[in-house]
Image (cartoon, helix red, strand yellow):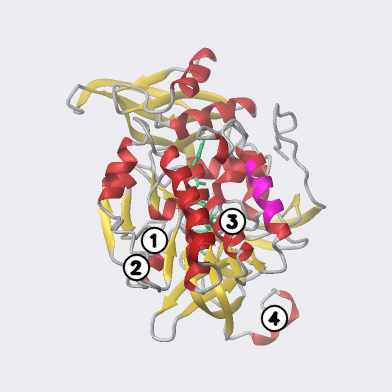
Amino acid sequence: MRETEVLVIGGGPAGLSAAVEAASHGCDVTLVDSDLALGGQLVKQTHKFFGSEAEYAGTRGIKIAKILFEELEAAKDRVTVLSNTTANGFYPDDGVVALVKDEEEYIRLRPKKTIVATGAMERLLPFPNNDAPGVYGAGAIQTLMNVYGVFPGERVLMIGAGNIGLIVSYQLMQAGVEIAGIVEFMPKVGGYWVHAAKVRRLGVPIYLRHTITDAIVEKGVVAGAHIQRVDEKGRPTEEIRKIDCDTICMAVGLIPTAEILWQAGCKMTYVPELCGHVPQRNAFMQTTNPNFWVAGDASGIEEASAAMVEGRISGISIARALGRIQGEAFQERYLELWQRLSNLRAGEVGAKIRSGLEKCSNCGCDWGEEA
Amino acid sequence: MNLIKEHPILEFHHARKVTFSFDGRSLEGYEGEPIASALHANKIRIYRETPKTKRPRGFFCAIGKCSSCFMTVDGVPNVRICVTPLKAGMVVQSQKGNGSVPWSEPEAQKEGDGLA
Ligand SMILES: Cc1cc2nc3c(=O)[nH]c(=O)nc-3n(C[C@H](O)[C@H](O)[C@H](O)COP(=O)(O)OP(=O)(O)OC[C@H]3O[C@@H](n4cnc5c(N)ncnc54)[C@H](O)[C@@H]3O)c2cc1C
């Protein structure tokens, strides 16, 4: 059995920020990630980010990842990093988190405090042949082409015209892959206008009020798809179109990855605005299990910018719970972080997130309550 | 290999090129990169066949969560090849059904199917 003060599960923007912040206040941290390399979704984002200046707006995702890796390197005396290591389960009886490293080594780790920053999982739509090789998640396509430089296919049909669908379409074209079209159920594009303009300019057809009815399979792999127009009530019409493609990319949303939180007995609430079941949390990002904190997409689907600040809030709050920082030093940094988070969620863009958070936050700012 | 050579933003730095076997064929890939990337770069998209309905399955999530890309690697079934790094000489096989662990052959395991 191994011990650690703080375990951070997930090394995306949320987990990296949490680890660095907790370490900067003197905590000993173990950071685990199931992937071969750290960075989560961030290392696949070649476009310049939105958000606020404090959270690197205008900087490409891959560059932001680099900045976080440098901070991690500077904190390496206090942070043990285990990649290719999956947190498979939490055992409440003895407080042990079971880790599997390199698919071989089984590690029992007992942390004092845990931050769950496990990010999200892709949604799939039900349609015939949706299990065929060639139907891929948008994140998977990004991994192949942006991390490993492998062509995911030759001609891709994108399902979903939200930010992810638009950005990944553009990235595919940058890599030299043809886009057969973008299919969107809603009557208008969901993503930011700039991203839509970029793909439109390149002549990609966007099929609004359409849905995919089935994937066409030849020799076991995707060889096309049928798409169908829906009417203003979302009901299928007679208009069906055949699309030639060898890959179908699903960009229809993400679901928070929350298994560990369920196992830890955290009170979970279904919040549609945050895209799934998320834990109840207080203003420290602490869940109803006093030893578990949460940050990033695992706490509700939002953005990398917010994930980074949430990571820092959970990191400093754990440092406080462990007695490493208190009083004014804590308050000053903590309030600054909350200010940054509120800035990101301000205005019309943040309205959905704010209404979702109302359903799962008990922001009574319970300053006195120590974990 | 079917790799992206020119990109306006990214530069790809691959590690050492190694050979491995896939269903008896000898293929090339880069050491340390996921087995799935190497197979995909060789235009191989079918990785297993489901136990009951015998449907082909391939890559899907790339984060080790969906179970779609299970293959038998060095004799071990149900390996998530999207998050398992490629090594020189690996024996990668399409998986049919649930796969089984060769408990009865401990000697054979020691000698080289990677379980030792
Ligand atoms: C195409 C696209 C474009 C985007 N554009 C923007 C943008 O412009 N601006 C912006 O702010 N955001 C953007 N985002 C969103 C942003 O990438 C995510 O919100 C952000 O990455 C969430 O961070 P995270 O750390 O919570 O999760 P992730 O980045 O998903 O990281 C989670 C990590 O946890 C690991 N993990 C999961 N489960 C386990 C386990 N059991 N054990 C160990 N490790 C585990 C995973 O391997 C992963 O590395 C975009 C996303 C996509 C897909």
Q: Name the chain under label 3.
A: A
The type of residue carrying mark 1 is Ala
Circle 4 sits in a helix, a strand or a loop, which is it? loop
From the top left corner, tell me how far across and down residue B36 is, in percent. 61, 52
Instruction: Residue under label 1, please give it.
Output: A258
Circle 3 sits in a helix, a strand or a loop, which is it? helix
The type of residue carrying mark 4 is Ala
The answer to whether A318 is drawn above or below residue B9 in the figure is below
Instruction: Residue under label 4, please give it.
Output: B116
**Image-quadrant location for residue A288:** bottom left
Between the C-alphas of marks 3 and 1, the distance is 18 Å
Mark 2 touches mark 1? (CB < 8 Å): yes
Tell me which segment is drawn in magenta.
A64-71
Q: Name the chain under label 1.
A: A
**Is residue B111 something one can see in this rendering?**
yes
Between the C-alphas of marks 3 and 2, the distance is 22 Å
**Are there few (<14), some (14-19), or many (20+) residues within 10 Å of tag 4?**
few
- The answer to whether the beta carbon of the residue marked 3 is less than 8 Å from any atom of ligand 1 is yes
Mark 3 touches mark 2? (CB < 8 Å): no
Which mark's residue is nearer the viewer, 2 or 4? 2
Q: Residue furthest front?
A: A328
